[in-house]
Image (cartoon, rainbow, N blue to C red):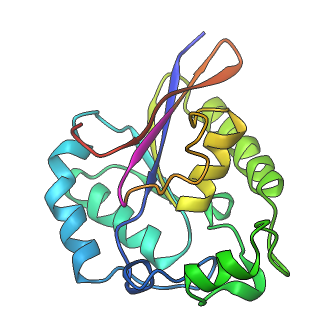
Amino acid sequence: MFVTTICLMRHGETTWNAEKKIQGRSDIPLNERGISQVEEMLAGIWSTTWDVIYTSPLERGKSTAHMISDPYGVPMYVDEAFIEKSFGDVEGQPYEHVFSTYPDGVYPGAETDEEVVARVLDTFERIAQKHPGKHILVVTHGAVIHAMLSHFQAIPDGLEHIILKQLCMNTFIYDKSSWTVRTYNKLPGE
């Protein structure tokens, strides 16, 4: 059985990240700092040789993925499964307002973490079967990564609300039909 590595990477910064607003599926592009972040971390990202790159269909994900794949000619695929969690009615609102208004984390019209995990796990299985034994980079979003880390209980107690860094890498290993988390919230080159 081949060991397959899937690394979920968060996209570079956007204006709404900097302004601490809930983005969800709002298609906000990278800002200048986000572009610089990717450029500065390219060498660290390539400390692992990636065989293929998948990305969210949102512009901030696709731009980050293109900046990583284009210089090396690595195949890149857009996959709807890696789109950010829908935050429903709270998209575009400041974190502080949302968290104080909905302390239970249940937002009107939002997708649940369970729904996110189900779509991503199905896609993990499909990708692992399509690319056995390969190193796969997936450019996605903070809430998607957080849902997956929580599902696998990879976030230590007391850090349930950890903020995932822009461009953080979170590595999932598929071996003998099961998934484990090797690393989380690591910046490229760390």
152 to the left or right of 92:
right
Quadrant where the N terminus is found in the figure: top right
Quarter of the figure with residue 30: bottom left
Residue 38 in magenta stretch: no
**Magenta residues, as a range?**
166-171
Q: Looking at the picture, how far across and down is residue 17, in whole percent?
A: 42, 77
Residue shown at 51%/52% (left/top)? 162
Q: Looking at the picture, how far across and down is residue 47, in whole percent?
A: 22, 35
Q: Looking at the picture, how far across and down is residue 4, in whole percent?
A: 52, 25
Quadrant where the C terminus is found in the figure: top left
Residue 169 in magenta stretch: yes
152 to the left or right of 136:
right
Residue shown at 30%/46% (left/top)? 187
> 159 or 148, which lies in front?
159
> 131 or 161, which lies in front?
161
Q: Is residue 22 visible?
A: no
Residue shown at 38%/50% (left/top)? 168
Up/down of 103 relative to 23, above or below: above
Q: Is residue 152 visible?
A: yes
Up/down of 16 relative to 41, above or below: below
Q: Looking at the picture, how far across and down is residue 49, in whole percent?
A: 29, 34
